[in-house]
C-alpha cells in the first residue's frame, strides 16, 4: 500500500495512514524548502495520492484578497495525480475549497468535523475523493457530541494541550522547530483521529454504497435519504445558497 503525500506539512495526515499500514512517500513541502512546481511523479508506482493543498485563499477567516496561489496549488495536485495514475486520490482542505474533479476518476465530497472523531474542538474539514474503480468511502464516526469552538494553534484563546495537539501524543515535538512554528504547523494539520478514520475508509472502500445525500459519507439502510436531521438541513441550506447565487449571478 504505497502512497504519495503531497503538501505533507509535518505529516499529520500521513500519520493516520501510516497507522493503518500504508507506506507513505512524502513529496516536497515549503516547510522543508521544497517546491511542488518542480516535482514530477512516476506513473503506476503509487496506489493512492493524498494531500492538503495550501488553503488560505479559500479560508473563511481570510482578511486579504486571494493571491491566486490556492488555485495554482490545486492545479499542481491535479497534475501530479494525472502523472502518477494512482487507483485513488484523496484531498483535504477547508469547506470553501473548489471542487476537484479529475478525468477518469469518480468524485465524492465529504463534510467532516473533528469532534465526530474524538476531538475536543469542532473543526470542519472537507475531503474530496476519487477512484478509478467507482469505489466510495463510508466514514465511520464516534458517538462524541458537542465540541468546543474551533481554536487554531496560533490563537490567543486559552486551549487545552489535547485540543492544541489534535490527537497527537502530549510529548509530540519536532526539535528543529521553534514553539511558534510547531504550533502553526500543528494548527494547519489534519486531526489525527480524523486522518486515521479516512485511512480505514480508504482500505474498506466499496462499490454500490447507499450513502447520505448530504455527502457526509454515512451509509444508510432501507429507503433512508439522510443520516440525521442535520444532514437534511445541510442539503436544504445548500439549495438555498445555490438559488441565491443563481439569482444574483454570483
Image: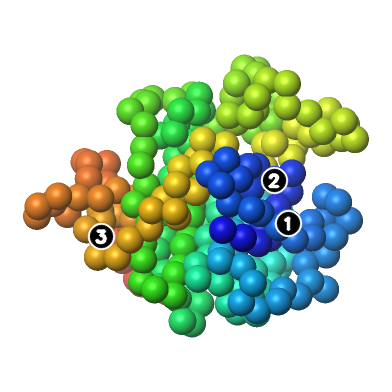
Q: Which mark is residue 11?
A: 2
Q: Are marks 2 and 1 in contact (CB under 8 Å)?
A: yes
Label 1 Cα crowd, 10 Å radius (few <14 / some 14-19 / many 20+): some
Q: Which mark is residue 228?
A: none
Residue identifier under label 3: 209
Give the vertical position of 84 relative to 236 (above or below).
below
- Residue sitting farthest toward the left: 223
Q: Which residue is at 87% across, 35% downward?
A: 177
SS at mark 1?
Answer: strand
Label 3 Cα crowd, 10 Å radius (few <14 / some 14-19 / many 20+): some
Where residue 219 appears, as percent x and y from the top left, is 25, 50
Q: Earlier in the sequence, mark 2 or mark 3?
A: 2
Q: Earlier in the sequence, mark 2 or mark 1?
A: 2
Label 2 Cα crowd, 10 Å radius (few <14 / some 14-19 / many 20+): many
Q: Which residue is at 46% across, 68% downward?
A: 130
Give the CA separation, mark 2 to mark 1.
8 Å
Q: Which residue is at 85% across, 60% downward?
A: 34
Residue identifier under label 1: 26
Q: Earlier in the sequence, mark 1 or mark 3?
A: 1
Where residue 173 appears, as percent x and y from the top left, is 78, 28
Total marks shown come to 3
Q: Is residue 227 visible?
A: yes
Q: Which residue is at 53% across, 44% downward?
A: 20
Give the CA separation, mark 1 to mark 3.
31 Å
Amino acid at each position: 500500500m504505497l502512497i504519495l503525500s503531497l503538501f505533507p506539512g509535518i505529516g499529520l495526515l500521513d500519520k493516520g495512514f501510516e497507522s493503518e499500514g500504508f507506506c507513505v512517500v512524502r513529496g516536497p513541502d515549503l516547510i522543508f524548502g521544497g517546491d511542488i512546481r518542480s516535482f514530477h511523479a512516476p506513473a503506476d508506482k503509487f496506489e493512492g495520492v493524498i494531500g492538503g493543498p495550501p488553503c488560505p485563499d479559500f479560508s473563511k477567516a481570510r482578511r486579504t484578497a486571494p493571491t491566486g496561489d490556492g488555485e495554482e496549488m490545486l492545479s499542481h495536485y491535479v497534475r501530479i495525480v494525472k502523472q502518477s495514475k494512482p487507483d485513488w486520490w484523496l484531498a483535504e482542505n477547508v469547506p470553501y475549497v473548489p471542487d476537484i474533479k479529475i478525468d477518469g476518476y469518480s468524485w465524492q465530497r465529504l463534510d467532516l468535523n473533528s469532534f465526530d472523531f474524538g476531538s475536543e474542538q469542532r473543526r470542519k474539514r472537507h475531503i474530496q475523493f476519487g477512484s478509478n474503480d467507482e469505489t466510495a468511502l463510508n466514514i465511520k464516526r464516534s458517538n462524541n457530541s458537542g465540541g468546543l469552538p474551533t481554536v487554531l494553534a496560533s490563537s490567543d484563546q486559552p486551549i487545552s494541550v489535547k485540543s492544541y495537539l489534535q490527537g497527537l501524543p502530549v510529548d509530540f515535538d519536532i526539535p528543529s522547530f521553534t514553539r511558534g512554528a510547531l504550533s502553526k504547523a500543528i494548527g494547519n494539520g489534519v486531526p489525527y483521529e480524523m486522518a486515521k478514520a479516512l485511512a480505514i475508509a480508504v482500505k474498506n472502500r466499496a462499490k454500490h454504497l447507499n450513502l447520505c445525500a448530504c455527502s457526509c459519507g454515512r451509509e444508510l439502510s432501507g429507503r433512508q435519504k439522510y443520516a440525521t436531521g442535520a444532514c437534511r438541513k445541510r442539503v436544504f441550506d445548500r439549495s438555498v445558497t445555490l438559488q441565491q447565487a443563481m439569482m444574483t449571478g454570483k
